[in-house]
Each structure stands twice: as structure tokens, then as C-alpha cells.
Amino acid sequence: MDFSGVSILVAFFLLIYGDNYEVKSMRKYITWDDIKIQNDNYRDHKKLGQRLGSGNVDDNDGSTTYRVIVVDQNGRGDSLTVQGAVDMVPLNNSIRVKIYILPGFYREKVIVPASKPYISFIGDPNSPSATVISWNDKASNRYKDGTELGTYRTASVTIESDYFCASGITIENTVVAILGGYKMQAVALKIAGDKAVLYRVRILGTQDTLFDESGSHYLYQCYIQGSVDFIFGNSRSLYKECRLHSVADRYGAIAAHHRNSEQEDTGFSFVNCSVTGNEGAIYLGRAWGNYSRVVYSYCDIDNIIDPSGWSDWNQPWRQRTAMFGEYKCRGKGADRRNRVSWSKSLGFVEATPFLDKHFIDGEDWLRL
Ligand SMILES: *[C@@H]1O[C@H](CO)[C@@H](O)[C@H](O)[C@H]1NC(C)=O
Ligand SMILES: *[C@@H]1O[C@H](CO)[C@@H](O)[C@H](O)[C@H]1NC(C)=O
Ligand SMILES: *[C@@H]1O[C@H](CO)[C@@H](O)[C@H](O)[C@H]1NC(C)=O
């Protein structure tokens, strides 16, 4: 069903249940406008007195309302903290809320709950380092009752809602994992909502930096830094023109994808990315699940890759079912001569499904 079909259905239900306001605004797609602050007033600190701004974007299918919430540590916005701004968004939110985060170092742990879709975190796409959300939980940390946090709850920023966007910010977990250290996993960002766009976002950590857990996601011109399994999870994500930067000392891995069966339509596709980093020899990917799926296409790969390229996670049967492919990559790290035999050098036909937005059904929900 296309968008207009959905609209008609929604309109029909609303005719019965009555709430006209929601019809116009429950968009099922993301546009560039959703990750931008158009009104320059918000960039001008003196005018921040306007507070809680809103505006209209002219869509093809009528006007869509959005709200702006300004986060400023210096007290001239609507909230001093990012979480404070998220808390201001109503439950079951149905219009785009642009949380404009002014430059600063925000030392806090942020959670966007599933009940708050359509939220954008917006900094300056030309200086994402100026706006930093930073925390430092690791898997071995304990709650007051003595139980360990575990990897999944360490994220500095956790996104559980759909249609999330972020641009021009840095999200970090400052724990530095030491090889052989006890439970040093420390997630910077976890994305568990469906349909997210990240543009020029920097995601920094060491072990388990980006937990790309579930849903379909588009990461464009992002910078992701880590050492071991620093992009992991079971989402279906397209990483385009991103830089994947290893800080591993001796060994590590970029992608650990967790697909468990052939039926799961998930995978990580890296297109036109650059892979850089320290001397250590890392894997392009490790088979976390039996059907782990990772493809690198048109990537520039520095000489930091273990020549074997890929790991079966010491579960040899995964060699038969994991799908690890490379297509037209460049650089010393792209030399496939000593790759494990069960990884694939893809041809054009095999690579095509991974090369663009169709991989994440972007034709349905991305209007960029
Ligand atoms: C939000 O939606 C849920 C599920 O439809 C509903 O149970 C709940 O009452 C709603 N809450 C508010 C504040 O609208
Ligand atoms: C790859 O990305 C660069 C910018 O980072 C761009 O100039 C180039 O056109 C892209 N190439 C392809 C094949 O998409
Ligand atoms: C992975 O494959 C092995 C060997 O076939 C099997 O024993 C195991 O149950 C599978 N794991 C999952 C999660 O399906």
C-alpha cells in the first residue's frame, strides 16, 4: 500500500474515532527538513526568548506542523538538558519535534522512549564536534541492588522510538576498553526504533560503540569509532559515505551482525565508506548470528584489516550460512588474496540489492 492508501485508511478510522488534527501530521516518511533547523532565529542566541517555536513545512500533501525545542546549557533555551527536552514531548507524539541542541558538552544519559516518535536531535552539521552528549557506563557497572548493567543498558543515548533523526552532533561513551578487561563493553548509541536517519553524527567509543539493534536505518556521512564489534546488532542498515575508524591496539572487528535465520530481512551494508585506524589488524566482520550478513561496496579500506578479513566467531558451522561480501573496494585492506574462502567477492548482480536505499526499503520512507 502506498502512502495515499495509508492516509485514506487513517482518515477513515479518524472519521469514526474523530481527531482530525492527527491526520495531517502522522507522516510515514523522513525528509531533509526533518533534520534541519530552517528558521535562523534559533541560531541567534538573543532571539531564543521565542521559546517553543513551531512552524509549517510545505509538503506536497499539505502543510505539516513541527515544533522546535531549544536545549541550551546557558539557560536561554527551553531546557538545560537533552533529556529535559525529550521529557517535554507529549506521549504518543504525532508531529515532528526538532530538538535543537546548542553547542556544549552535555554530560547525561538520554533515553527516547518508544512512545515518542518523530523526534530529531539537531546540532550543526558543519561542526558536529561542538555538540557532545557524553556518558560512561560499561557492562560491568552495577545497579544499587548489585546486578550488572550488561552491554544493552550502557548506552549514553538510547533511541526506542520510530522516525528518529539526528544531525550535527557527537554521541560518546568515554569508557576505554582494555583487551582482556572484564566486561568493558560500553555503548555510545543504541537505536532500536524503526526508520531512523543519522546525518553527520559522530559516534565514539571502543568496544560495542554503536548498537544498531533493530529496524531500518540510514546513516549518511557519519563517523563511527571503536575497537571491538563497534557496529553490532540485527538491524537492516545502510551506511553511506561513512568513516569507520578503528582505535584497536592489536585486534578487533568492525561489524558484528546478529541475523539468526534466513527469514530475517536484516544486514549491514557499507557503501562508499572509508575504513581507517590504528596499526592493529581487525576483522571487517564477525558472525555473531548463524546468518550474519555484512557487505562492503565501493569502500576505501586502509591497511588495518586482518588478511583473512572475516571471523566465524569460532562457530565453524556459521561459515555455511553467514553472508559476508565485498564489492569493488579499494586500498590495501581490500586485498582479498588471503581472505577466508567462505567470504564472497560479489559480482554486480549479487551486490545490487545492497547498493542503495532499496536495501532498507527507502523508497517507502526516505524522501531525501
Ligand atoms: C498513548 O497510546 C497508548 C496506546 O494506543 C494508549 O494506551 C495511551 O492511553 C496513550 N497515552 C496518551 C497520553 O495519549
Ligand atoms: C563516494 O563519496 C564521495 C564523497 O565522500 C563522492 O564524492 C563520490 O561521488 C562517491 N562515489 C560513489 C560511487 O558514490
Ligand atoms: C545455529 O546453528 C547451529 C548449528 O546448526 C544450531 O545448533 C543453533 O541452534 C543455531 N542457532 C540459532 C540461534 O538458530
Image: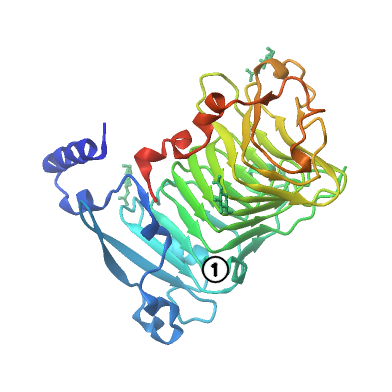
Q: Is residue 109 left or right of residue 367?
A: right
Furthest toward the left, the residue is 15
> Which secondary structure, mark 1?
loop
Judging depth in this view, the residue of 285 and 343 nearest the camera is 343
Quarter in which the N terminus is drawn: top left
Q: Is residue 278 above or below residue 260?
A: below
Nearest the eye: 347 or 196: 347
Residue at position x 51%, y 74% in the image: 102
- Residue 189 vs 229, above or below: the answer is below
Farthest-out residue, bottom: 46
**Image spot of residue 113 (x, y percent):** 46, 50
Q: How many marks?
A: 1
**Left or right: 132, with 150 as reference point:** left
Figure coloring: rainbow
Q: Position of residue 93 (x, y in %)?
A: 34, 53
Q: Residue at x 62, y 40 (%)?
A: 298
Q: Which residue is mark 1?
A: 126
Task: Look at the picture and state if 349 lies above or below 270.
Answer: above
Residue lying at 52% horizontally and 42% vertically, measured from the top left: 192
Q: Quadrant of residue 286?
A: top right
Question: As shown in the figure, which amino acid type bears the numbered disc 1?
Answer: Asn
Using the rendered image of the protein, determine whether residue 141 is visible from the camera's viewpoint: no
Residue at point 73%, 15% (across, down): 317
Crowd band around label 1 with a 10 angstrom C-alpha radius: few (<14), some (14–19), many (20+): few
- Judge whether residue 195 can be spotted in this image: yes
Q: Nearer the viewer, residue 240 or 202?
A: 240
Q: Residue 46's x, y, as percent?
A: 42, 87
Where is residue 4 shown, x and y percent of the image? 21, 40
The residue lying toward the viewer, choosing from 329 and 183, is 329
